[in-house]
Each structure stands twice: as structure tokens, then as C-alpha cells.
Image (spheres, helix red, strand yellow):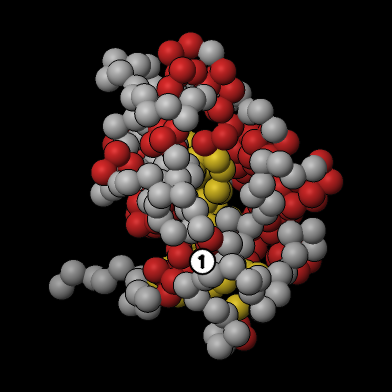
Amino acid sequence: MEQANPVKKVMITGAYGLIGNIVFAHLAAQPARYDAYAMVRRLKPSARAIQMDFTDLPEEKARIADLTDADALQQAVAGMDVVVHMAGDPDGRSGWESVLNNNIIGAHNLFEACRLGGVKRVIYASTNQVVFGYMNRGPLQPVIKSDADRRLPNDTPRIDHTQPTRPLNYYACSKVFGEGLAHMYAQTHGMSCICLRIGWVTSDDQVWSSRARAIWCSQRDVINLVECSINAPDALRFDIFFGHSDNADNFVDIQHAKDVLGYSPQDHAEDRPIVSPT
């Protein structure tokens, strides 16, 4: 008789954020596969729309911790098989202090808490912004830096995960640091650390500008990418993947995620009308 796969205990940090919330809601809806936990700084969400409020969850499923509190983090991740680290300051316009505390000190505290807690895998939410510097020159510039409805030629070289990073703000720099931490913890402590350079996921799941066609990721595609990462083979020690939908104008390569993770994006930015955010 074939043995059923064990239920995985998965913690989503930053579970009131846009991506953290939709991923948590997806996992929580599959109790036969996932024992889903949410980490938040407070039980009351901000005013923005979310799919799932955690005030009605059992206390042990909604764990409260701040990224700057190393002890609270260690308690929050205790017993997890996988931690999906979505928490942090996501704004490229943020100043140094916020990025330092939430994305640099916080990322270190999170990885260290997972090491001490015996967490087998950390999925680190990085960003495609770590390579936005490539947009400032070469064949990508006239398409991505313009609001004109221009398309990337099929033979345009795409940026892949092996190329050097080119961040343009503190936020992106902090994500480069986080990717470095992931590599260090994978190689030094034997953890499985997967970095996802996630594209532009919008609150209404729409494409907000013509240039977004090169960087957009739908909500169901980012959910698929995270779920593929959760269930990747145990032997996957460290890797980096771009998380875009299957857009014709992608300026980055997503084939690596398809080949290694089995990522199967369903959406295409060019099939969506451009809808200004409300």
C-alpha cells in the first residue's frame, strides 16, 4: 500500500501582507496536506483588504512576533517543517532605518531562529528588483523604462539567476543580503534555502501599466511558485528562482523555475487589460 505524504507544518511570516495572506489562505484550505501557521506582529490587520483574518484562528496557529525580537521569532518557528519568509518592509521608497531593522536585522534573526529551531527549509521572499539595474541600459531600457505600449522582441536576452545583482534602492539591497544569508545557512548549516525573486503582484490581480507586462505575477501564479517550493525535493539545498507569470514580455528567465521546481504559471500579462489601480 502506498504511504500517504505526511502533513507539512508550514509557517508564513508577514501573513497580513498581500502575498503572505493569499498564500496562507491557500495552504490553510488544504488541511490534509498542510498544517498552516501565520506569523504576524499583531492580530488586528491593517485597513487594506485581505483574504483571511487571524483573529478567529486558534491561538497556536496565529503566532505574534516582531522580526527584531529574536527570542519571539524562535518561539514562533518552533516545530515548523518549512518557514515561508514574507515579512519585512516591502517598499522600495523606504528609508534606511526601516530596511535595516525589518529586512536586514530581521532576516538574520529569522534564519537564525530557524536554524536553532531545526526548521528544514526556509523559502525566502526576495524580489525581481535586485536586477532592476539592468533596465537602465541595453535592449531592455526602451521597453521597460517607458509607458509606451512597446513589446520586447523574442530574441531579447532575459536576465537569469546566475547574473550579478543590480539593485537600485535600499529595499533591493536588503534582499540581496537576504539571498546571501540563505546561501550561507544552506552551505554552513545544511538547511534547504530557496530564494524567490517575486514580480509585481497587485491587490486586485490586474496589470496596472504597460511596463508591468515585463514584471507582473498573478496571485495564483505566485501561490503556485511558493507551493512548488514547499514541496521541492529535500535534496534541493539552495537556489534562486524568478517569480513572474508566463508573460511574453518578461525581462527575466522563468524557465529555471519551471525546470527545477515544476512551476507551471497559468497567467499572461498580455492577456489582461491595463487597469489603473483604484
The image quarter in which residue 268 lies: top left
Number of numbered tags placed on the structure image: 1
Q: Is any atom of residue 23 visible in this view?
A: yes
Q: Position of residue 208 (x, y in %)?
A: 45, 45
Q: Secondary structure at mark 1?
A: helix
266 on left or right of 190 = left
Q: From this view, report whether residue 214 is shown above or below residue 3.
A: above
Q: Position of residue 47 (x, y in %)?
A: 63, 71
Residue closer to the observer: 151 or 119 = 151
Q: From this view, report whether residue 53 is shown above or below residue 135.
A: below
Residue lying at 51% horizontally and 58% vertically, measured from the top left: 278
Q: Is any atom of residue 100 visible in this view?
A: no
> Which residue is identified by label 1?
21
232 on left or right of 3 = right
Q: Position of residue 195 (x, y in %)?
A: 52, 42
Q: Position of residue 35 (x, y in %)?
A: 45, 75
Residue closer to the observer: 127 or 8 = 127
Residue closer to the observer: 218 or 63 = 218
Residue lying at 66% horizontally and 47% vertically, measured from the top left: 91
Residue lying at 37% horizontally and 76% vertically, measured from the top left: 29
Residue lying at 63% horizontally and 57% vertically, measured from the top left: 87
**Three-letter residue code for mark 1:** Asn
Q: Quadrant of the N terminus?
A: bottom left
Q: Residue furthest left?
A: 1
| Crowd band around label 1 with a 10 angstrom C-alpha radius: few (<14), some (14–19), many (20+) | many
Q: Residue furthest right?
A: 97
Residue closer to the observer: 196 or 145 = 145
